[in-house]
Each structure stands twice: as structure tokens, then as C-alpha cells.
Image (cartoon, rainbow, N blue to C red):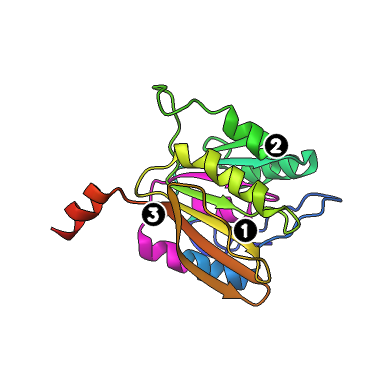
Amino acid sequence: MRIIAGAHKGARLSSPSGANTRPTSDRVKESLFSMLDGYGVLPAANVLDLFAGSGGLGFEAMSRGAAQVDFVDSSLAATRALESNADKLGLDHSAEVHTGDVLHFLAGLPGPENPESRVFDLVFMDPPYPLGEDAVTQILRRLSTHLDMESIVVVERAARSPEPTMPDGLEVFRAKTFGETAIHFVQLVAEPDEVSAAED
């Protein structure tokens, strides 16, 4: 796996040894980041990469200007590969690697009422395809308290899977299918007064 654009273009990433990971293909990644460039979300972004694997999406974001990425994966082999990749790219100062369950990680973040609460500009969520839709919805619900109105969540699922069920407060605003892979772009739902202000 390699980084396809930006400051670290061409750099190869180590994959977890013996781990059952499913890296995002270069074709999908190139199209995905072209769309993200159009939204202007990458420069200086605070990024969260859930089910990170070897970190192909998070490191691609950093190569293209993201300021900070938190990588989360439950596999020790994956997080070792993530740490190795961050060190190899000289990004260990701006990459935080967390070993553990995604829901437990999100539950441990300070809530919105806490002055140390975390808000992410961009979130990659690439769970194993067998992960049930209820679990995906539960993760999105927990994640929603760490987003603002400009945040984008990218959910990758199998094309044959139904569109993820959104919890209250979130909506899919764009979706695209690449062969066996479907990408869903998710954002917070604008409150009525915010919609009115945008239309004025």
C-alpha cells in the first residue's frame, strides 16, 4: 500500500502481519480524496481514523495537509504497523495510535460539556464488512457529539450492504459506489435556524 499524493507521495506503508485487514484500493482512495479536496476539509484538519488497519486513509490525509490524526484499531498487529508507519514517515509527533475497541475509545473521550472535549473535522470509518448495521449506527451516534457543522464522516461499506442507518442528528449527504465498495459521506443535520440563515 502506498500514499498516492501530497508531501509523502509514493511512500509505502507497512501492513499488519497476519491481520485480516482490508485496505482501501488506490482507485477508491484517489476518488475519495478528490471529493474531500473539493470540500476543502483537509488543510490543518483534526482527523480520526477508526478501524484504521495500516492507516492508509489517515496517512493519506496527513500527506495532503491534515494537522493531526488519531488512529484507532483493536488489533495489536495493526497498531504496531501504524506506529511503524508514523515513525517511518516522520509523523509520530502528529499521529496518535490507540489500541482498543472503537466504541470504548469514543466513550472515553471527554463529552461536549468538558473544556477538553475533542471535535474532529474529518472521520474515516472503515469497519469490517461483517459488522452489523446496529453496531455501525451505535458508533455514529457516539461519534456525533464530537463533530461540528463543518465535519465530514466517511463511512466505507460493502456495496451490497444497505445504506447505514443514521442516528438522530446525522444524515448521508452523498454516496458513491466503486465496484464492491460504497462510500457514504455523513454530516450533522443543520438546525432549522441554521438552514434559514444559510438561505438568507
* Three-letter code, disc 2: Asp
Which class describes the residues within 10 Å of circle 1: few (<14), some (14-19), or many (20+)?
some
Which class describes the residues within 10 Å of circle 3: few (<14), some (14-19), or many (20+)?
many
Circle 3 sits on which residue?
A: 41
The secondary element bearing badge 1 is classed as loop
Q: Position of residue 49 (x, y in %)?
A: 58, 47
In whole angstroms, how far apart are the C-alphas of marks 2 and 1? 28 Å
> Is 191 on the left-hand or right-hand side of 81?
left
> Is 2 on the left-hand or right-hand side of 81?
left
Residue 50 circle label: none
Circle 2 sits on which residue?
A: 101
Disc nearest the viewer among 2 and 1: 2
* Three-letter code, disc 3: Val
Residue 11 circle label: 1
Q: Residue at x 70, y 60 (%)?
A: 23
- Which stretch did the figure color magenta? 34-62
Q: Is residue 129 magenta?
A: no
In whole angstroms, how far apart are the C-alphas of marks 2 and 3? 26 Å
Q: Position of residue 196 (x, y in %)?
A: 19, 54
